[in-house]
Amino acid sequence: MPGFSGSSGLRAADYRGLSLDVARKTFTSDAVVRLISRLAELGFTALHLHLTETHRVGVRLPGFEELAADDAWDSQDVARIVAAAEAFGIAIVPEIDLPSHAAALLVGREHLQLVDHHGRVHADRLDISRLEALELALDLLEAAAALFPGDAIHLGGDEYFAAPWEDEDAQHPERFPSLLEHARREIGEQATAHDSYALFVNALAARAIELGRTPLLWNDHVVPVSEGPLVPISTDVVLDVWIRWRDWTPSVTDYLLSGYRLINSHGDQLYAVLSEDGPFEPHGKRRFGLLADTFSPRRFMGLAAEDVHLEVPPVPAGTPDPVLGASLSVWCDAPDVMGERELLERLDTWLVPFARIMAADGDL
């Protein structure tokens, strides 16, 4: 199993993960138990469970049972999954995705939805400027930790602010006045909405550490130390690096120079996506080739959709490696495109080459 708290001596192959979107799509506990057995057979060390999404909560979280989908996992399902993971030596990494993708978590708490400077309500975004919103997020984090014991927990954190291709209004630095006011109240007049985000993430990370968990976070909105953020995101957080949208956005090099540990979840190479266009191709086939021909554990995204990559060199023997490993991701944006059995059978054609490459890297 991956050792997050003591990374000294870890090689880039030690975290061999699969992220499974059990929020958008229903997976039976029987299927997940079989998947765990297969992961162990192939040498995987972690199963990351994406539990919540905009339209669905895939598990009955203690204290928040009313938010769960009708077919969500109950406590017996979770117990079977946890027992299988323990038996096969697979670390479970639960994720409550906040502060975006949050509409299903905010049912009955609509007053915590984020409002922009036009007065428009963003139902899928949590207004992190509010103390009640932070308390909710901390309670959800603790609920997930109570269900899924282990060494790590994923904080989510993706796609809260505008993507680079969105229009000028979406990119406006004062788009969300409550975040700006919160940051300036807590930090000072030079603070930005990103400082409000960093305060929120750091509070969640601190609680995770209190619970004995290493916090993981998608890399989208992490401002490197070199850019001088007033509130840096704690380097106790392991960055799950999936995207680099533009050459002026932070790169893996920036994160390393800032002192972060990383997991490589390369969105162009390691994402199997069910979309309206159809199911994902077998054998890790993406637009730039087969996984077996394109993937390397230390090859991070250089630019999205450009087949441009950044290679992180190996560290000297005996030196702690900031690259903890890599992870495949299964995203179910269009959950009905494939059935459970068909999806997992096709996924196996991705698991095998990924495992082979990770094992080869670990033998170096």
Image (cartoon, rainbow, N blue to C red):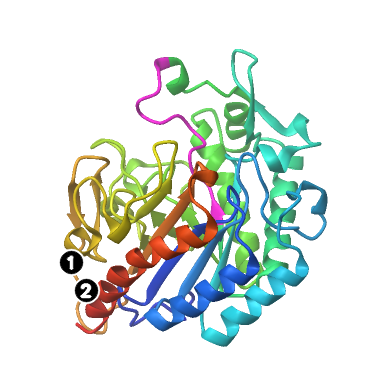
x, y percentage for residue 331?
Answer: 47, 50
Q: Nearer the viewer, residue 33 or 258?
A: 33
> Circles 1 and 2: CB distance less than 8 Å?
yes
Check disc 1 and report the residue beneath it: 313
| Identity of the residue drawn at 42% across and 57% down | 329
State which region is magenta.
155-168
Check disc 2 and report the residue beneath it: 315
Q: Amino acid at mark 2?
A: Val
Badge 2: residue crowd in 10 Å (few <14, some 14–19, many ≥20): some
Is residue 272 toward the left or the right of residue 85 in the image? left
Q: Nearer the viewer, residue 339 or 313?
A: 339
**Residue 304 against residue 141 in the figure, above or below:** above
Q: Is residue 3 visible?
A: no
| Identity of the residue drawn at 45% across and 55% down | 330
x, y percentage for residue 349?
Answer: 33, 65
Q: Is residue 66 visible?
A: yes
